[in-house]
Image (cartoon, coloured by chain):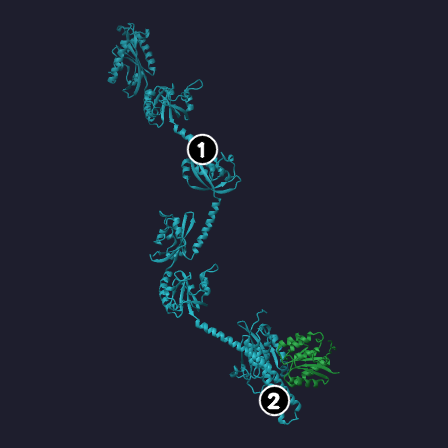
Chain colours: A green, B cyan
Amino acid sequence: MSIEVLLVEDSPGDVRLTREALHAANPQIKLHVVSDGAEALAYLMQTGTRVGEPRPHLVLLDLNLPRVDGREVLATIKGTEHLKAIPTIILTTSTAQEDVVNCYELQANCYFNKPVELDEFLNMVRCINDFWLNKAKLPNGRFDA
Amino acid sequence: MPSKTRVAAQLEVLNTNGNIAEPKTADVETSEHLPRQEQKWRVLDMMLSSFADFAYAFDREGRFLYANQPLLNLWGLKLEDVVGKNFFDLGYPDELAARLQQQIQEVFSTGKRVADETQYISPTGVQGYYEYRLSGVIGVSGTVELVAGASHDISVRKDEEKHLVQMEARYRGLLEAAPDAMVVVDTDGEIVLLNVQAENQFGYSRDELIGRKVKSIIPEGFAERLIADGTRTAAEALAQQIGTGIELTGRRKDGSEFPIEIMLSPLESTEGILVTAAIRDITVRRNAEKHLAQMEGRYRGLLEAAPDGMVVVNQRGEIVLLNAQAEKHFGYRRDELLGQDVKNIIPEGFAERLIADGTRTAAEALAQQIGTGIELIGRRKDESEFPIEIMLSPLESAEGILVTAAIRDITVRKDAERHLAQMEGRYRGLLEAAPDGMVVVNQRGEIVLLNAHAEKQFRYWRDELIGQKVKSIIPEGFAERLIADGTRTAAEALAQQIGTGIELTGRRKDGSEFPIEIMLSPLQSNEGVLVTAAIRDITVRKEAEKHLGQMEGRYRGLLEAAPDGMVVVNQAGEIFLLNAQAEKHFGYSRDELIGQKVTNIIPEGFAERLIADGTRTAAEALAQQIGMGIELNGLRKDGSEFPIEIMLSPLESAGETLVTAAIRDITVRKQAEANLVQKIEELNRSNEELEQFAYVASHDLQEPLRMVASYTQLLSKRYKGKLDSDADEFIAFAVDGAKRMQRLIQDLLTFSRVGKRGLELLDVSSDRALKLALVNLRGSIEGSGALVTHDPLPEVMADEAQLVQLFQNLVGNAIKYQGPGVPHIHISAVKNGAPRWMFSVQDDGLGIDPQFFERIFGMFQRLHKRDEFEGTGMGLAICKKIVERHGGTISVESKPGLGSTFHFDLAASGRRL
């Protein structure tokens, strides 16, 4: 079975990197990418043009996004009954403590800084995979409208 | 014939028949008759001589026929010498002899008896008075044959009579001189004697009264008292009256009556016991008694109403009268005390003082006490005693002199006196301790008290001054001020002086004078109002005043020369003085401002600061402002305002505290300040913008940088060995560059973040911050094996994250720039002033050359080549920024090759540990 992961990231470079890293870590991951917050929400809400898309097992969320900011996306996910159970991992360049605190307060499951070093980056993704997709138990949910 | 025989013969004749017979002369000579006749004659002679009286006989010629022995003894003669002689022959005085002769003849011729008396001095020197009787003896012829005589010595009676006459004369004198009327009454009640007073009293002349019954002047009461009745003799009756004054009524010649008092006394006289009555007109006394009775009533009233206890005591020391107050004082009822000895209530001191003793009478004794308040002890009924003061005064009464004692309970006064004595003691203490010379003067201007300071001031000994006139030390101005004159009393005179310091001149013992200031105050004492003068030697002050005068002149000069505007203001807020600069500042001329309120030129802030209000005096208000430059607004004559800064300082002048204000026109400064503020604001803004910019920039630069770094690394990874070695090298450089850029931007980000947010200083445990930093560094610490130690670190006021960063950078540096061997790093902190903590991070690493001590804290400053040590050169710049933001400074001391110690300070925590 495939593991659905939603990546919310506006930098194509970062998208490619993440895709490469995830694939290297776990070939079973099926990566879905949206590049702004509104699309992310639409995807998750199963409205608009994205009907019938599978519910992700994991969301990787950048903070600085156009249109709808990542923090807002987080808040919405965690504020929506049928979405809040989805593990949402923040992946951002921001090292600001406020952001860290804020995100956890918004019920982010985890917060990561994107490392500068490539190796570190690859390592981090491997860790995420290892922890969340191998070791941790995830809730099996269905989409309810 | 011998005489004897002849006499005998005659006598015989006499004797046989009582008649004298003519003797026969022849018969006589017969000798037979003679012895018998002789015997008879001898017996007769003896018989007649046994009488005391004289007996004798004469013949018709007046010649002695016989004289008895007593008479013979008186003459000192013998019978034969006497017979046949007459008085002339016997040496009697002619006058007497003649009289006697004549009287004898008278008896012979008339036959009638003759009695008489005479004084006679015998030849033997015996003086005497005699009464005699001559009687004729009738013979047979029927005619007087001889005269017989008998004499009796009445010398004694004569003496008595003479004495009596003398007494009478003397008595008459007394009588006349007596102040009272004197009337002498005989046993028949007839007036025998009276004096001129009696004449005047009764309005009679003497002869009108003499012989009259005393009843005519004293109708009743006199005669009766003297009557000898069946029950008593006149003498007894009189005796009963003697000595007592009897009140009766006298009647004058004109019939009017008046009250009299008579005093009787007996008077022996030839006529029997007479009664002398001293008669006193007691009209006045009667009136007085009536008056007195009235007075008594009034007196009793006064007695009762008297505020003091009043007790009247008679001469026996018995209480005859007392009032209600006295009852209260002593706790007795009136009847319990009347008649009692006054000793019962005043045990000692009263009775003794009034006793007449050998040296003085009761009246004198009393007189000595009159008017003086005598302090004694009174004893109440319950036996308790209390101090009293008695004032005595005599009281004439019918019973003699009584003594009225006004008794005052002086318990309170005694306490007051004791208190006063204490006070006096304390006062003396105060007097001695006073910093000024103190002199107490009585109402006569004499010094009664002074203290040691005054002794020193005037250079006298105390006893040289006490009793002296105060004029001797203060020649003028003191005594005069206190003299009561026609217009005011001494008390008023004093009252006018109280409280004011009077400048006078004092004179020392050696005559030298010095200026003094005296302050007067009244002092109540037993001796009346005394004046206490506090005397201050103002020599110094006077000189200071002179000096001040000089200074004033100099000051004025300074004032004019001062670069600032100078304004001197008095306590009423009025401008007292100003200089040319001030004129210029405010655009006024001097006279336009002098006397004006300072609020005219400094509307607010000046006057208020100096006002004495309920909470502080002007001096205190001023003191609070001294030394501070106060920024206010000045108001020019043209109405324009300008900013000024005033500096205040007090100025003592003639007892008044003035305020000198140095006024500086700070328009320019204010402008500069405003400019500065503006500039600062701009700078701050621009700094903020820069910081903001730096942050944003770094933050936004991160991302593309990451791309470059990541993909170049990816390239390197994936195509290493697949491209040529040049490609490898090119890619390697690219990667390296990207990484460095990455780190720079991180540091820049950190640096800018230090100042980005508002700094919130909280109580932070620097110990914990260090631990956190060490946790962050654990990789390098483990890698280098560094030994990091620290002393107990304090609580500080800091931003925790930044403090962690600070420790992290410093310790990280220490590890990075380690020397050979294992790095030893020690962190400590000492407290220095302020209170701030001085931290030290000490290492034994490479050390730093002193020439770089400053540079290393700059941005992007590196001391080593890139291949020696990695690093962006931002670490210490970040540390410096952190420390400075915390209000501290960072520095380094180091010896190359030995190590470095970095110092920085932080504020101590407000919390007490």
Q: Position of residue B859 (x, y in %)?
A: 54, 82
The residue nearer to you, when weighing B548 against B899, is B548
Q: Chain of mark 1?
A: B
User: Which residue is the extreme one toward the front?
Assistant: A48
Q: Residues within 10 Å of mark 1 (few under 14, many from 20)?
A: some
Q: Amino acid at mark 2?
A: Ala
| Identity, as a three-letter code, of the amino acid under mark 1 | Glu
Dot 2 falls on which chain?
A: B
Residue at image coords 34%, 27%: B178
Q: Which quarter of the rendered picture does the C terminus of chain B lie within?
A: bottom right
Tag 1 residue: B296
In this view, B790 is above or below B187 = below
Q: Position of residue B753 (x, y in %)?
A: 58, 78
Q: Nearer the viewer, residue B609 or B416?
A: B609
Vertical order, B870 against A97 (above or below) = below
Which label sits in the foreground, 2 or 1? 2
Mark 2: few, some, or many residues within 10 Å (few <14, many ≥20)?
Answer: some
Q: Quadrant of residue B504?
A: bottom left
Res B356 visible = no
Above or below, A19 against B272 in this view is below
- SS of the residue under disc 1: helix
Q: Which mark is residue B705?
A: none
Where's residue B129, x and y in %? 30, 19
Identify the residue position indicated by label 2 in the image.
Answer: B734
Both marks 2 and 1 on one chain: yes
Q: Nearer the viewer, residue B738 or B794?
A: B738
Report the Cα–Cα distance between label 2 and label 1: 148 Å
Give the quarter of the image for residue B77.
top left
Q: Quick check: B184 left or right of B836?
A: left
Left-right relation of B169 to B904: left
